[in-house]
Amino acid sequence: APTAKPAAPPPVAPTAAAPATPAAAKPTAQAAKPAAPSPSPKPAAGQPKNGGILTTGHGGDPTSLDVHQETGAASYAITAAAYNGLVKYDPHAWPEQKVIPDLATSWQISPDGKTYTFQLVKGAKFHDGSPLTAEDAKFSFDRMRGPKVGLTASPRSQQLAAIDSIDTPDDSTVKITMKYPQASFIGLIGSFLFAVVPKHVVLEKKDDMTKT
């Protein structure tokens, strides 16, 4: 015989009870938020100080301090921080290779690309207090182009082989004339290897700048 179907449960009468509030939605007591910490006062900027001793670490001893003659990194680490060039690479523009003024405030290039005229910073001095002049710049480039005083080797001479002559119309102007246009010239002398040194010191040391 067929099994009888179970009777349906009786309907539940609706009630007026409020729907249950999910636990996540139940209001809870809020803890007081901690007050935001007051900003710490910034330390006063340090004031520049002339003189003193700067100690740095190096991977080796320099073979000499002659910035024009040396080719080793151990020497560069010191001489690059001791000298300036006419122009330099902007350290804040890295990795962009941007040349900016250094001892030269500006420079002009002739339309034929063969003459560079540099205007020097006025009032610049070497470490001994002597004033920088255009003659110091000319002497430095002549020293790198070909030794005139006693330097036996110049590792920069081939890089400056395009220079024909260097003139100093006045104490603040250096005029470099090329044998032919050299598009890389400004970028080349932006390297710290092409530093301007004090002529009077080099002459006094009889061209021996290895320890000076």
Image (cartoon, rainbow, N blue to C red):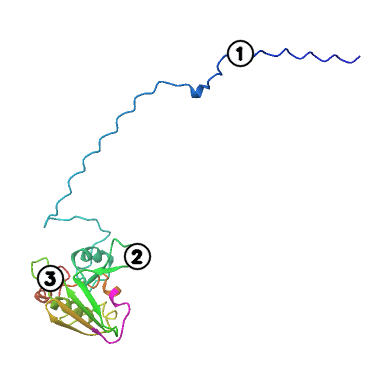
Which label's residue is closer to the chain start, 1 or 2?
Answer: 1
From the top left corner, tell me how far across and down residue 189 is, in percent.
Answer: 26, 74
**Along the line of sight, which residue is nearer the eye, 149 or 181?**
181
Q: Residues within 10 Å of mark 3 (few under 14, many from 20)?
A: some
Badge 2 is on which residue?
96
Instruction: Tell me the SS state at disc 3.
Output: loop
The amino acid on which the numbered mark 2 sits, given as a three-letter code, is: Glu
The magenta span reads 177-186
Badge 1 is on which residue?
15
**Does the magenta stretch mainly form a helix, a strand or a loop?**
loop
From the top left corner, tell me how far across and down residue 78 is, in percent.
Answer: 21, 63
The amino acid on which the numbered mark 1 sits, given as a three-letter code, is: Thr
Q: Closer to the observer: label 1 or label 3?
A: 1
4 lies left or right of 113: right
**Along the line of sight, which residue is nearer the eye, 82 or 46?**
46
Instruction: Tell me the SS state at disc 2.
Output: loop
The CA span between labels 1 and 3 is 97 Å
Badge 3 is on which residue?
122
